[in-house]
Amino acid sequence: MKAIAQIAALAGVVGSIAYMIIWSIDFASVTALLASVGAFAATFFFVPYKAAGVSQEQSVGDGSTAYQAGRDIKISKRKG
């Protein structure tokens, strides 16, 4: 997925350079080039991280009552 983003951003850079060559170098072409170079650079620096697994564990006594999400939860011994 990261490679696809890098290829797309690189295509934007190449397109911006082509735009500058074909037409004149003006504010719009320079802005487009800077934005595409920034997007291309971001694909290297801002790598998505793998989210850590979410888990919760608690030790309680048998027959306890817990309060979670606005309702009661009965806790009994784990079977297994």
Image (cartoon, rainbow, N blue to C red):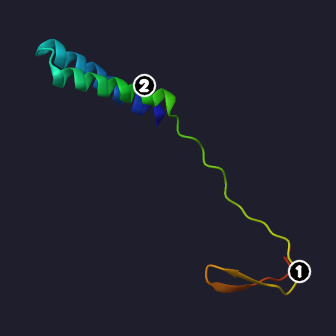
For residue 40, which quarter of the picture?
top left
Q: Nearer the viewer, residue 4 or 64?
A: 64
Q: Which residue is mark 2?
A: 41
Image coordinates of residue 33 in percent, x first then y, are 27, 22
Q: Secondary structure at mark 1?
A: loop
Residue in the picture at 81% in, 69% down: 58
For residue 76, which quarter of the picture?
bottom right
Image coordinates of residue 63 in percent, x first then y, are 85, 87
User: Does the image show residue 7?
Assistant: no
Residue in the picture at 22% in, 20% down: 30
Residue in the picture at 58% in, 41% down: 49
Badge count: 2
Q: Amino acid at mark 1?
A: Gly
Neighbourhood count class around disc 1 (C-alpha, 10 Å): few under 14, some 14–19, many 20 upward: few
Please say if 18 is above or below 36. above
Q: Amino acid at mark 2?
A: Ala
User: Does the image show residue 51?
Assistant: yes
Q: Secondary structure at mark 2?
A: helix
Residue that protrudes farthest toward the top in the picture: 21
- Find the distance from the CA under tag 1 to the CA under tag 2: 54 Å
Instruction: Indicate the quadrant containing the C terminus: top left, top right, bottom left or bottom right.
Output: bottom right
The numbered mark at residue 32 is none
The numbered mark at residue 61 is 1
Neighbourhood count class around disc 2 (C-alpha, 10 Å): few under 14, some 14–19, many 20 upward: some
